[in-house]
Image: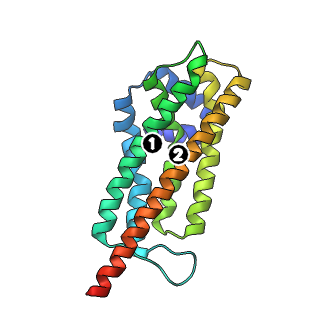
């Protein structure tokens, strides 16, 4: 797992060739990559929101209770795992016009590795300043796009021009999925914060 993470960051083209040779299963991807790396934003957000609290850069911070943070973290984790499978299925569907289209499970594996920069950017949620987390998220999206552009042609066996078109579409849809996920998470975490405030008020 760690070797692929370093390879995707340091030399993505070579690493994609290595990943393609492995013919990895979805279960192996999840147990050795997705389950571990997707825990980074979840654990970071749990620690950040319960110990430090959300802040826009000022002095005031909104904390989430441990109980609310735990339940919201579990839901956040489940949504991330589902999002990887969803994006993989979208890649499979969009690649339907190409004769060399990989199987659905191969597309999910591809999506799992593409999401690596997004998982790593979740470290910034340890101290959840909104603008800092936003910048980290943008950086993660940008590098995810770079991995897409590098990996799509060899993964699908198509030209770089076709790969550019497909990866651009995939990135656009993936960003929409990400925005929906983030909006839901922020909403849920803000509800958790509100519940904590109400609970402390009645105490």
Label 1: element kind: helix
Numbered circle sitting on residue 83: 1
**Residue lying at 44% horizontally and 58% vertically, measured from the top left:** 185
Sort mark 1 into few (<14), some (14-19) or many (20+) by Cα contacts within 10 Å: some
Nearest the viewer among 93 and 161 is 93
Looking at the picture, how far across and down is residue 120, in whole percent? Answer: 50, 51
Q: Nearer the viewer, residue 169 or 131?
A: 169
Task: Kindly identify the residue that appears in the image at 56 percent across and 38 percent down.
Answer: 8
Residue sitting at 60 percent across and 48 percent down? 141
Tell me which residue sits at (37%, 37%) in the image: 30
Looking at the picture, how far across and down is residue 65, in whole percent?
A: 32, 73
Quarter holding residue 94: top right
Cα distance between the residues tagged 2 and 1: 7 Å
Q: Position of residue 20 (x, y in %)?
A: 51, 23
Q: Are marks 2 and 1 in contact (CB under 8 Å)?
A: yes
- Quarter of the image with the N terminus in it: top left
Counting from the top left corner in percent of width and height, residue 66 is at: 30, 70
Q: How is the image coloured?
A: rainbow
| Left/right of residue 176 with respect to residue 82 in the rendered view | right
Q: Mark 2 sits on what residue?
A: 177
């Amino acid at each position: 797992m760690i070797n692929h993470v370093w390879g995707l960051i340091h030399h993505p083209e070579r690493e994609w060739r290595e990943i393609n040779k492995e013919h990895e299963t979805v279960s192996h991807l999840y147990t050795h990559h997705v389950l571990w790396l997707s825990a980074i934003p979840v654990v970071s957000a749990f620690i950040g929101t319960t110990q430090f609290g959300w802040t826009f850069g000022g002095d005031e911070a909104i904390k989430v209770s441990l109980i609310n943070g735990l339940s919201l973290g579990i839901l956040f984790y489940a949504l991330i795992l589902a999002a990887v499978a969803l994006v993989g299925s979208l890649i499979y569907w969009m690649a339907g016009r190409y004769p060399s289209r990989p199987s659905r499970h191969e597309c999910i594996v591809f999506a799992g590795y593409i999401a690596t920069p997004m998982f790593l950017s979740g470290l910034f949620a340890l101290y959840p300043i909104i603008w800092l987390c936003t910048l980290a998220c943008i950086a993660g999206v940008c590098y995810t796009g770079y991995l897409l552009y590098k990996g799509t042609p060899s993964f699908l066996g198509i030209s770089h021009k076709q790969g550019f078109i497909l990866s651009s579409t995939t990135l656009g849809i993936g960003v929409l999925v990400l925005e929906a996920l983030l909006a839901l998470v922020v909403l849920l975490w803000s509800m958790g914060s509100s519940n904590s405030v109400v609970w402390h008020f009645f105490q």
